[in-house]
Image (tube, grey):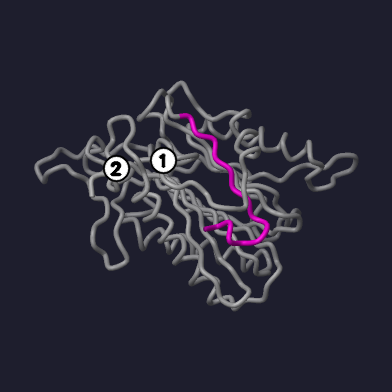
Amino acid sequence: MITDVPGIRVGHWTELEGITGCTVVLCPPGTIGAAEVRGGAPGTRGTESLKAGSLVSEIHAIVLAGGSAFGLAACTGVERWLEERGVGFEIGPVKVPIVAGAILFDLGIGDPAVRPGADAGYAACEAATDGEIAEGSVGAGTGATVAKFPDPTHGWKGGVGTASERDDDAVVGALVAVNAVGDVVAEDGSSIAANRAGPETERRAWAMTNTTLVVVATNAKPDKARAGRLAIAAHDGLARAIRPAHTLWDGDTAFVLATGEAEADQLWLEQAAAATTAEAVRRGVLRATSAGGVPSVGEET
């Protein structure tokens, strides 16, 4: 799991009646952050500050949330939780928590008036653990769906998945909230979740109702530019497991957290970022449970 990376903690807030939620990834002091946005319909906060050459190198939390753009409000609760604990980037008389986030669209599956807000982000922080993480239809994956082309009414439930790899002292872990318009495939290319509509079905793709979100964490110590390369590699992982990925209707976004404790080869780090992302995508879909009338692959098999 992504929590195999020392110092990384993950918490979920799940709202089953509204079928939405959020997930927070907390990291230790001195963690370097990076981000890469590849989808055509993103909803993000703080990604510009994670680019190489920006003033602030460290980051304190990543927020993944449902609720479309409304869900970015969960970041405010995470900021409040961090500030109460004296965590932040020192600017004059205050410490400002550096919190980045991204959202996915899940308003079509449950109650569209229910979205993760500041209290949800705060609660996810309170629930954060460095141990085993719940996967499937929890947190940001509660209302996630996949395989929605050509007919979104014949898709499958998505969810949260996580995976990790180790090489000596170096660890890379990924956490993914899978909410893709594309199908999900196994490593050999065989189908895990494909749209259930027949060939005669009229094309009815949902515009801007998708998005897969990734957090890759490692205890290695790349600089900010090389951490950015890991975010690019994470998108390679999405393309391995989701077909198609990075479409006009997806806001696919990948974050990287590097805590800087272990030496590791950059090529291995990039390979591991792609591999763990792909595995986390598959786990999120296979561990999802049906909700809002959308069936689960794991419950069908």
Q: Is disc 1 surrounded by few (<14), some (14 to 19) or many (20+) residues within 10 Å? A: many
Give residue 127's quadrant in the image.
Answer: top right
Q: Position of residue 134 (x, y in %)?
A: 49, 46
Give, as a three-letter code, the residue at label 2.
Ser
The kind of secondary structure element at disc 2 is loop
Residue 4 colored magenta?
yes
Q: Position of residue 132 (x, y in %)?
A: 54, 52
Q: Is residue 159 above or below residue 273?
A: above
| Residue ID at (67%, 44%) | 99
* Disc on res. 296: 2
Do the numbered discs 1 and 2 sit on residues whose CB atoms are within 8 Å? yes
What is the number of the mark on residue 125?
Answer: none
Identify which amino acid the numbered label 1 is placed on. Ser
Indicate the secondary structure of the residue bearing disc 1: loop
Residue 88 at x, y percent in the picture: 78, 45
**Residue placed under numbered mark 1 in the picture:** 137
Q: Residue at x 68, y 57 (%)?
A: 7
Residue found at the very far top of the displayed protein: 113
Of the residues under marks 1 and 2, which one precedes in the sequence?
A: 1
Query: Separation of disc 1 and disc 2 at Cα?
Result: 10 Å
Position of 237 with respect to 193 (left or right) is right
In the image, what residue occupies the spot 76% across and 55% down?
29
Q: What residue range appears in magenta? A: 1-15
Left of 242 or right of it: where is 253? Answer: right
**Residue 66 placement (x, y as % from top left):** 48, 36
In which quarter of the view is residue 80 placed? top right
Q: Nearer the viewer, residue 67 or 204?
A: 67
Figure check: 174 above or below 10: below
